[in-house]
Every structure is written in C-alpha cells, then in structure tokens.
Amino acid sequence: MKIFSHFCKQEGIQRQFTVAYTPQQNGVAERMNRTLLERTRGMLKTIGLAKFFWGETLKADSYFKDTN
Amino acid sequence: MSTSDDEEILYGEAKIGSKGGKQLTDVWIVDSGATWHMTLHRDWFYTYEPVLEGSMFMGNDYALEIVGVGTIKIKMFDGSVCTLQGIRHMKGLKKKLLSIGQLDDLGCKTHIEGAILKVVKGALVVIKAEKIVANLYMLIGDTLQEVEALITSASQEEMTVMWHRKLGDMSECDLKILVERNLIPELKSVNLPFCEHCVISKQHRLTFGRLTALSKHILELIHFDVWESPEMSLGGAKYFVSFIDEYSRRLWVYEIKKKSNVFSIFKEFKARIELESGKKIMCLRIDN
C-alpha cells in the first residue's frame, strides 16, 4: 500500500478513500461487480460449466459489456 | 418592598373560605404581586436554610420576618413532581404564594385564559392553576411533605425506571396508562428520567446521498475494486480487479492470483490506458 500511494503521488493521481466497512461509498464499482457476477453465473449455468471457469467467463463477459 | 393592593384584597377575600374541601390556607395561590414564593409551613420544605435577617412589607406596610429560604416539591396536575426553588419561609404569613416574577426569572411564560392559568416552560406546561371563587388562581397539585417528597422522588423514580426496563423499555405514555388502570400496584406516579438506551437504540444510519456527474472527461475519475472469489478459477486466479471510468463507464477487468499483484496490475493498466487515450488518470476511488 505504501508503494501504491507513493506511485500515485508521483503520477499526480488523487486518491479518494471510502470509509472502512462502507462499500456503499464505492457504489459504482460494487454495483458493476454485481452485474458482472450475475452475468457470469448466468453464462456458466446456461452452458453447464463448473464454477471454476468463472475467471475465463468473466473475461469474456467484460469484453461483451464493452463491445455492446 | 413587594405587593400592591391585591395583597390586601387577597387577605380580605381569603375569608370566603374553601374550595373542594381544601382550606384556602392550604393551597398555593399564583400571585403577580408577590416578590418571592412564600409560605409559613416549615415542615413543607424539602431543603431549608435559615435566614438571619430580612423582612418583607405587605400591602399595608406591615413587615413580616423572613426566617428561611429553601425548596419545596409539588406534585403537579399531571402527576409530575416539580421542585420550586427560592421559597421564603415567612413568619406570620397565612397564605402560600407563588410569585410570577420568580417564575419569569426561570424563563417561564404565564398565560391566563378561560379561568385557567398556565405556566409554560418551552413547550411544556409546568404549572396549571384554576380560578376559584375569590378571583384567585389556585395551583392544581399537592405539596409533598419532606418524608413524602423523599419517597416519591427517589423510590417512585427508581420504580418507574425498573418497570420501564422490565416491560422492554416501555414508553412513558404507556406506563401512565398502566398506572391509571392500577395494573402496577406499587407504582403511584410515572416520572421517567432520561433513558440513554432508548435514544441510542432508535438511531439509524442516514442513507447515502446521490452524487451525479462527478467528471466531465474520460479518466477524470476511475472507480476501482478488488473482488475475492470463494473458488479458484481454472487459470488459478482467486481475485479480480475492476476499473470503471466514471465518464464513459468503460470497464476493464483483470484476474489476479494474489492480492499483492494489484499494484503491478494498476501500473500496467495505467500505462496502457494513458497511452491509448493520451490523457492522464486524475482521481482514483478505492475502498480500503
């Protein structure tokens, strides 16, 4: 985390932290995660793949989301 | 020093007598002409300090000696116990007087309407008095004698708190209903002090406000989150990192095997995205 903040300072990136244990404040990211995971689950179920394919499916899913 | 003509009238009219079985000498009379609250009864005082010297002139310039100052507890019309301060113990006074001026000093307002006198503090009616035959305003309530005052103030209050807790922090209103119906025999009056637990338990979180249009260009604000999977993926990844651009809502997802890889992924992402767009990341929103 120290290297991270140092890097951000160097690159002039301002960081906004949310309050601990309050994921509501990071709403956009958390909501996107939900959407992604719902889609991923749906795809896995439709094709009938095992759960450990989530990484690959997720990758495909995020690609679809951006091209659509 | 005090009192105008109405004091004399008071004395004259007082002979008229009684109301509701109570002698006029036994009740408190609200008086705008009185300098202080006054009484004769030594045994009514809850706290008492003797006064060595002091006198007070009545309407007929007749001086009465002030013997002491103290507090008296009065059970008011609504059953609550009120402590009046700065009451003068007068030798030879036949009446008990409540001074409106002294109440005013405490920030109380006095309203008289339709034969009812109300003393209001804030939004609360503290004292009520009704007009009686002699055109005097008689306080509705009973004076608590020293012993009685001790019992009522201490044990009744403790009892109320105890029942309040026993009945699952029941409200004061509901307790009053129970007492009115005589369902709690040992409780005579309800006087619930401030209950901290009630207030704390009623607190709730405020909703998060909506923020819209934070950014006007791409890469001005990037939302960032790491998600941990309960299961390892085929490629061996346990986490994924997502970046979302606030303006364009474009999404980038990277799978990683260890949390410590987040930093290198971010560097990679940053380099790629800044080269592609020709802009710089200005702000990053992350949770801890």
Image: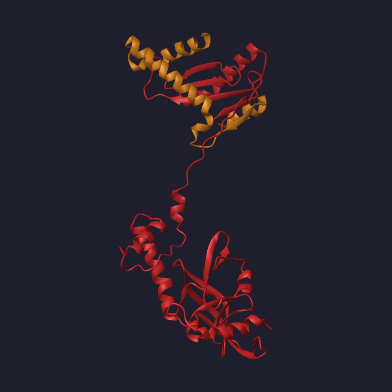
Above or below, B231 against B204 in this view is above
Residue B13 screen position, x and y as percent? 56, 83
Q: Please give the name of the residue rendered at 53% of the width and 29% of the height, measured from the top-left corner.
A: A26
Residue B32 screen position, x and y as percent? 63, 75
Tint of chain A: orange
Tint of chain B: red
Residue B285 screen position, x and y as percent? 58, 28
Residue B115 screen position, x and y as percent? 54, 68
> Quick check: can you spot residue A18?
yes
Above or below, B152 against A30 in this view is below
Q: Is residue B273 left or right of residue B166?
A: right
Above or below, B137 against B57 in this view is above
Q: Is residue B271 left or right of residue B130?
A: right
User: Nearest the camera: B267 or B224?
Assistant: B224
Above or below, B188 against B148 in this view is above
Q: Is residue B144 left or right of residue B110?
A: left
Q: Please give the name of the residue rendered at 37% of the width and 59% of the height, measured from the top-left corner.
A: B177
Quarter of the picture holding the N terminus of chain B:
bottom right
